[in-house]
Image (spheres, helix red, strand yellow):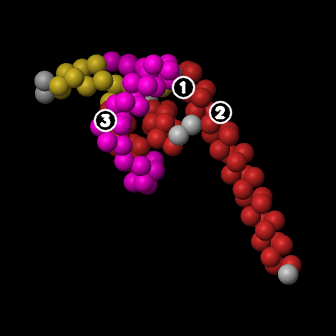
Amino acid sequence: MQEPTFLILTALAQGPLHGYGVQQEVAALSGGQVKLGAGTLYGALDRLAEQRLIEVEREEAVDGRRRRYYRLTDDGAGRLAAEVDRLRRNAAAAAARLRRRATALGAT
């Protein structure tokens, strides 16, 4: 799973958000490292909706503009949980190898 997708699903894990809210949460979650432009964001939201990982919860009009609120589906939560597990395993393997490296370098 690509980082923007992971961050979008993570943003929606705490509850429904409109597109701009997702954009702001992704920036906050990544410490400002991932900034999704509107075209990228809405393309990703459409793709995730097609994959049934998220869905439109509701729409409302604000100042004459349509605002969609997206929510994580059960399938989306399952995919996000699987990705969290994968990342934990990879991080644990990397940490173990770094510890072995430090031990080996300290022994020489």
Label located before the other in sequence (3 or 2): 3
Residue plotted at (62% across, 33% down) = 81
Residue plotted at (29% across, 37% down) = 38
Element assignment for label 3: helix
The three-letter amino acid code for the residue at tag 3 is Gly
Residue 93, x across and y down, in percent: 75, 52
Give the crowd class for mark 2: few <14, some 14-19, many >=20 residues within 10 Å: few
Residue that mark 2 sits on: 82
Whether residue 7 can be seen here:
no
Between 104 and 9, the one lying in front of the other is: 104
Residue 31, x across and y down, in percent: 43, 54
Judge depth for marks 3 and 1 and give the one in front: 3
The three-letter amino acid code for the residue at tag 2 is Ala
Element assignment for label 1: helix
Tell me, yes or no, whether the two marked residues, 3 and 1, touch with CB atoms within 8 Å.
no
Left or right placement of residue 78 versus residue 18 in this view: right
Residue that mark 3 sits on: 39
* Label at residue 76: 1
Marks 3 and 2, Cα distance to the nearest angstrom? 27 Å
Element assignment for label 2: helix
Residue plotted at (65% across, 44% down) = 87
Left or right placement of residue 50 versus residue 102 in this view: left
Is 65 included in the stretch rendered in magenta? no
Is 45 included in the stretch rendered in magenta? yes
